[in-house]
Image (cartoon, grey):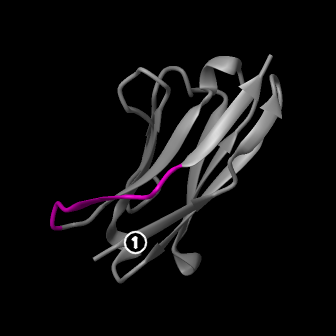
Amino acid sequence: QVQLVESGGGLVQAGGSLRLSCVASGSGFSTNAMGWYRQAPGKQRELVAFIRSGVMTNYADSAKGRFTISRDNAKNTVYLQMNSLKPEDTAVYYCYSLTASGRGYWGQGTQVTVSS
């Protein structure tokens, strides 16, 4: 069982930055793939960024060049550094964990609002 707790969301002006954090409980964090997804009102949940158990990452086109996903295995934490934020980045951001056995877990989400 994995529990995920996100933090770091908030209200920011366009062009600003936020860093989201997700702390995972349970064992096996270092071998789990971790990701950030987001869901805007009236839209489907979409992938923002993903990081494998090593350092391999992938990003949505909308995030490339602006967002950076990273992890600290010693702290069981994954981060999403978001720079040059745009109003269209407004969404609830969810942390996701995929275990080596293929089970997925979601956090409760953190709201990010970017004002123009």
Residue at 42% over, 49% down: 35
Q: Is residue 27 left or right of residue 110?
A: left
> Within the image, what quadrant is residue 26 found in?
bottom left
Image: magenta residue range? 101-109
Nearer the observer, 54 or 92: 92
Quarter of the figure with the N terminus: bottom left
Q: Compared with residue 91, is residue 95 higher up or lower down, i.e. above or below?
A: below
**Magenta stretch contains residue 108:** yes
Q: Compared with residue 58, is residue 30 higher up or lower down, i.e. above or below?
A: below
Residue type at mark 1 is Gln
**Magenta stretch contains residue 13:** no
Indicate the position of residue 14 as horizontal and vertical percent values: 80, 22
Indicate the position of residue 96 as horizontal and vertical percent values: 39, 54
Indicate the position of residue 92 as horizontal and vertical percent values: 53, 39
Q: For the residue labelled by badge 1, is the local secondary structure a helix, a strand or a loop? A: strand
Residue at 62% over, 28% down: 90
Quarter of the figure with the C terminus: top right
Residue ID for mark 1: 3
Q: Is residue 109 left or right of residue 103?
A: right
Q: Compared with residue 95, is residue 18 higher up or lower down, i.e. above or below?
A: above
Q: Residue furthest front?
A: 42
What secondary structure predominates along the stretch shown in magenta?
Answer: loop
